[in-house]
Amino acid sequence: MTTTADATAPAAASAPPLTAVYRPPHPLNMFRTVRALMRGPKDPTMLVHGTTLWRASRTPQGIATLALRQSTEGVHATAWGPGAEWALTQLPALCGADDDPAGFDASLHPLIAEAARRHAGLRLTRTDLVFDAFASAVIEQKVTSFQAFGAWRVLVTRFGEQAPGPTPRAMFAPPTVAGWHGIPSWDWHQAGVEPPQSRALVRAAERGQRIADAVLAAPTGADRDRVLTSLPGIGPWTASETRVRALGDPDAVSVGDYHLAHEVGFTLTGARADDDGMLALLEPWAGHRHRVIRLILASGVREARRGPRLAPEDHRRR
């Protein structure tokens, strides 16, 4: 059983689509694994249509569109665009092939043990596209998911590049690093991104590829955090989210999240926790703390809502 993508067509920007099959040596739920990257139901870079998951990305070789479908034989992938070959080579990592659960003990808590049993095919995906992961995380700082996903949709659609291939609807790859840097201030405002977040992203784009290279070269999660948090306007939450999305980091914990500590505390103890309490609860799984968080979220256990949903303020001129 092979663990690499088997390309069946030559790579060329003007050629027909390339195809590959990834045959994982372990249980895999491709949809649950890769769909964690989707930024809301109207994400212009991802779409689930029937039994196919579509993904548009900007690879080091150019934009690519992937259509993924899982069968008993493996994950069948079709790729279009100049980045098609890169996307197929990276397909196993996207499906969690680099995710190593060695040392993870689900039996330390009965709910985690049950979630791990029920979701044995859940893997931690990685994209290897650091700046795209970083940009989406910055946009999500200190706002509701509704606001962040809307801003991502507007900016990627307006300043990204339309994805190739027979996509079910128009899809877009994110902007280039230079594209992020060049977004005018009024477009950030119109998309609903506050000045601190837009400034942080624009400043980071001035060093774009150097940041990505430094993060990829960093040997540990703490080293990656030091690289990212050295940037103005970037704290531990953004660093952790970047590590999770780009590198599939199994130990990243998004300290400072509005809901996460409450969810972890309630699921593991039946009572809310703050960030310090969450870190203490997750300590027995050091090295796999994000894996535990993913299993908690997959378990479906949720604290009952205590009040009305937050209504975000909108200061944009109508």
Image: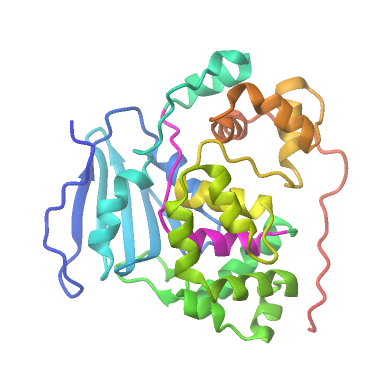
Relative to 242, does residue 285 appear above or below in the rendering?
Answer: above
Vertical position of residue 306 compared to residue 143: above or below: above
**On the image, which quarter does residue 24 sit in?**
top left
Query: Magenta residues?
Result: 121-141
Q: Position of residue 1 (x, y in %)?
A: 18, 30
x 52%, y 18%: residue:
105
User: Relative to 214, is 275 on the left or the right?
Assistant: right
Residue at 47% in and 50% down: 218
Q: Residue at x 71, y 40 (%)?
A: 260
Q: How is the image coloured?
A: rainbow
302 relative position to 110: left or right: right
Give the camera-side residue of 229 and 278.
229
Query: Is 75 covered by the magenta stretch?
Result: no
Which residue is situated farthest in the right direction here?
A: 307
Total labels drawn: 0
Q: Can you give x and y, in whole percent of width and height, for residue 282 in the image? A: 66, 27
Residue 40 seen in the current view: no
Q: Is residue 85 left or right of residue 149?
A: left
Is the C terminus in the top left, top right, bottom left or bottom right quadrant?
bottom right
Q: Name the image quarter holding residue 202.
A: bottom right
Q: Nearer the viewer, residue 81 or 108?
A: 108
Verify whether residue 137 appears in magenta.
yes
Q: Is residue 306 visible?
A: yes
Taking depth in this image into account, of 62 and 202 the one nearest to the observer is 202
Q: Is residue 273 above or below residue 315?
A: above
The percent coordinates of residue 25 (x first, y second) are: 27, 29
Residue at 45% across, 57% down: 47
